[in-house]
Image (tube, rainbow, N blue to C red):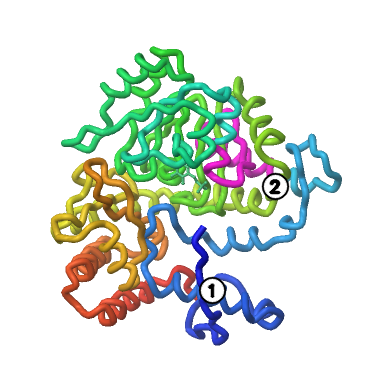
Amino acid sequence: MPVTTPVAPATVPPPDTAVPQDFRALLRQDPEIGGILLAEAGRQATTLQLIAAENFTSPAVLAALGSPLANKYAEGYPGARHHGGCEQADAAEGLAVRRAMELFGAEHANVQPHSGSSAVLAAYAALLRPGDTVLAMGLPYGGHLTHGAPGNFSGRWFEFAGYGVDPDSGLIDYAQVRALARARRPKAIVCGSISYPRHPDYELFRDIADEVGAYLIADAAHPMGLIAGGAAPSPVPYADVVCATTHKVLRGPRGGMILCGVELAERIDRAVFPFTQGGAQMHTVAAKAVAFGEAATPAYAVYAHRVVAHARALAAALEAEGFEVTTGGTDTHIVVADPGPLGVDGRTARERLCAAGMVLDTCALPYGDARGIRLGTAAVTTQGMDEDDMVRIAGLFGAAVREERDTGRLRADVRALAERNPPYPG
Ligand SMILES: *Cc1c(COP(=O)(O)O)cnc(C)c1O
């Protein structure tokens, strides 16, 4: 790991930043970390959070995260714990499980995975043996680390075959998926990606999995919030196991979850605890319950649809600025753009954009070796931005990447746009 130089903590917190929690007591006791947290709140409020995996949780979710359940050990499951004093932990987890099942129409939910990767690890542990073959989206096309990266447990313990996309359309090449499934006879097929901006055809994946007798695992870490809000199709009716995160579009705490049918419920539960994890983080489980409650509201459904509309507006506006958008647009919150036509690569574009306060990451492009930029509209939509703001953001992108304007002036425009839409209005 590279050693990063610690940044001097902001001992004077930005006074005009509305923060989601009262940090005063913390600041008095520990001004160093208190200052860092306030400076981070300031950073989030004065720059644009366009990382596709990020969002702003509600003050209610943050309150649950900062609650006394953080003190509780609760190995096991409600009604069958290894520790005493779990009455409220059981109640919180029971509520989270029931809300997840209802929200997604699933027969079983496990809300304990510490992260999306832990959820995938548990799904593999439940269904596979080391050495088994798994067919997943290849990493150059948007497969996640847990889909066979050499440095990840998945790449070390399983044999991965990777499917890709059609080089012209950028869409999943289902004929190739079927051909690979027939040739490799995988034990499981994984659908889901970190940067594919379209919906997987879950029904077709199910058909291919059935043909070769494979389990179908949907890794819906990214679109789970869109699914909750009815803005994306659900894999629940088709996949044997659905893995997800709770912190992306879903807007809950950092964490994972797994949905499955009753017949796999016990295997999944045992794969989470005790196979891959110890005690669950009960404050996070409580915060997941809060997020599921929020995601079941009509307001959240409106939000989910706005996220997609904003991503489409942003994709179109970026194309107008000269970027090339993979698949020609998006059906989700994700936009992947190639700045190549503007004469720069993804890394340079990210550096220029981040310097101007537009925070995003690079990602593999589904063709060639060049990297593109990946952005998402979940956070800016939570802030209350609208489609006109997306056009403004695209204009700022063009100016920053083409170095048309002074970075300081761009940064001021970005800050003004962010501050018109505070993530935590005071
Ligand atoms: C984000 C993501 C994960 C992992 O989530 P973490 O919480 O970062 O471990 C897994 N799979 C996919 C497809 C993802 O997008």
Residue shown at the point (57%, 25%) measured from the top left: 130
Image coordinates for residue 10, horizontal then vertical, percent: 53, 82
Residue hosting label 1: 6
Between residue 93 and residue 13, name the one nearer to us. Answer: 13
Q: Indicate left or right for 413 with 187 as reference.
A: left
Q: Indicate left or right for 295 with 211 as reference.
A: right
What predominant SS class does the magenta segment belong to?
A: helix
- Ligand 1 contact, mark 2 (Cβ < 8 Å): no
How far is the residue under mark 2 from the one under mark 1?
38 Å
Q: Indicate left or right for 131 with 359 as reference.
A: right
- Could you tell me if residue 76 is visible in this image? yes
- Note whether 216 is above or below 355 in the view shown: above
Residue shown at the point (43%, 41%) measured from the top left: 144
Give, as a three-letter code, the residue at label 1.
Pro
Residue segment shown in magenta? 92-120
Between residue 3 and residue 386, name the one nearer to us. Answer: 3
Residue hosting label 2: 92
Q: Secondary structure at mark 1?
A: loop
